[in-house]
Amino acid sequence: MGKIYDNVTLEEPVEIILYDGNETYNVSVIMRTPVDDFALAVGFLFTEGIVKPEDIEGIKYSESAGISEKNNIVTISVKSFDRQLIGNRNFYVNSSCGVCGKTNINDIYLKAGHLIGHGNPIDCRQLLKLPEIMRAKQSIFQNTGGVHAAAIMDYSGNILSMGEDIGRHNAVDKAIGKMLLKGIARSPEAVLQVSGRAGFEIVQKAAMYGIPIVSSVSAPSSLAIELAVEFNMALVSFVRRNSFNVYAHPERIKM
């Protein structure tokens, strides 16, 4: 029998380091697919409430890293950051769990500092198209079948930003990080489309960025629904072909 070769998704650790002009701080080690690392780092720090976009001064791969660590250590220069959040958490993040164990919605509200305002609804027919629009752009998935995707899309279905990663939460951070690197701090009329389930950490990251609608092709969790309700976000799951379920704020969907 001949050999069969297959493309496999890469999974490697990346370390995120902050530098405030005087000292360096080891913030996190994240298991990820090594693409869009700068967007991942910025998105992660923002959605965790550690760094505000306006405080970022520069980002680069560490020049002191050894050969085996090349492009696996990202250093972000900042004017300031929330040291308390780093001191209170052990930020080792594997590719399946996100930042596990965060269940305090009040903490998320304090980090975000806002609730999402009411705006125009999205047409339900357009909402149904979003998973396929995103899937057509999933180049890594097409080659390996082993990654999640997240896309920030406008109500017309245009992809504003997109990330792919072996971790669903990393894909969201990459999509948000790309927007932040463009200088766009909020997306008040947009949809976060994700390829997997809508867990708490997915909705939390969307809430931090001010996205009013989260759409997933799989199931939500109870805590994700609770968070969406509290933040005035629509949570739509099982978005497949001609049907979907709305779990929070149906007024954001035009039927």
Image (cartoon, helix red, strand yellow):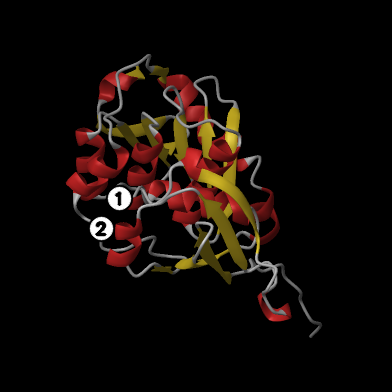
Point out residue 246 in the picture as x, y percentages from the top left corner.
29, 32
Please state which of residues 130 and 163 is positioned toward the viewer in this rendering: 163
> Is any atom of residue 53 visible in this view?
yes
Q: Amino acid at mark 1?
A: Phe
Please state which of residues 16 and 239 is positioned toward the viewer in this rendering: 16
Q: Tell me the quarter of the picture where residue 169 sits.
A: bottom left
Q: Secondary structure at mark 1?
A: helix
Q: Is residue 44 above or below residue 67?
A: above
Q: Residue at x 54, y 38 (%)?
A: 180
Question: Which numbered dot is residue 23?
Answer: none
> Is any atom of residue 28 visible in this view?
no
Question: Which numbered dot is residue 200?
Answer: 1
Q: Residue at x 30, y 27 (%)?
A: 116
Q: Position of 156 compared to 6: left or right?
A: left
Q: Circle 2: is it few (<14), some (14-19), or many (20+) Cα within 10 Å?
A: few
Q: In the rendered picture of this protein, how many numbered marks are placed on residues?
A: 2
Residue at the far right in the pictured view: 2
Of labels 2 and 1, earlier in sequence is 2
User: Which is in the foreground here, disc 2 or disc 1?
Assistant: 2
Q: Tell me the quarter of the picture where residue 61 sits.
A: bottom right
Q: Circle 1: is it few (<14), some (14-19), or many (20+) Cα within 10 Å?
A: many
Q: Residue at x 30, y 50 (%)?
A: 200
Point out residue 58 in the picture as x, y percentages from the top left corner.
61, 49
Asked if the residue at tag 1 contacts the one at tag 2, i.e. Cβ–Cβ closer than 8 Å, the answer is yes
Q: Quadrant of the C terminus?
A: top left
For mark 2, what is the residue?
102
Point out residue 105 in the picture as x, y percentages from the top left corner.
20, 46
Q: Amino acid at mark 2?
A: Lys
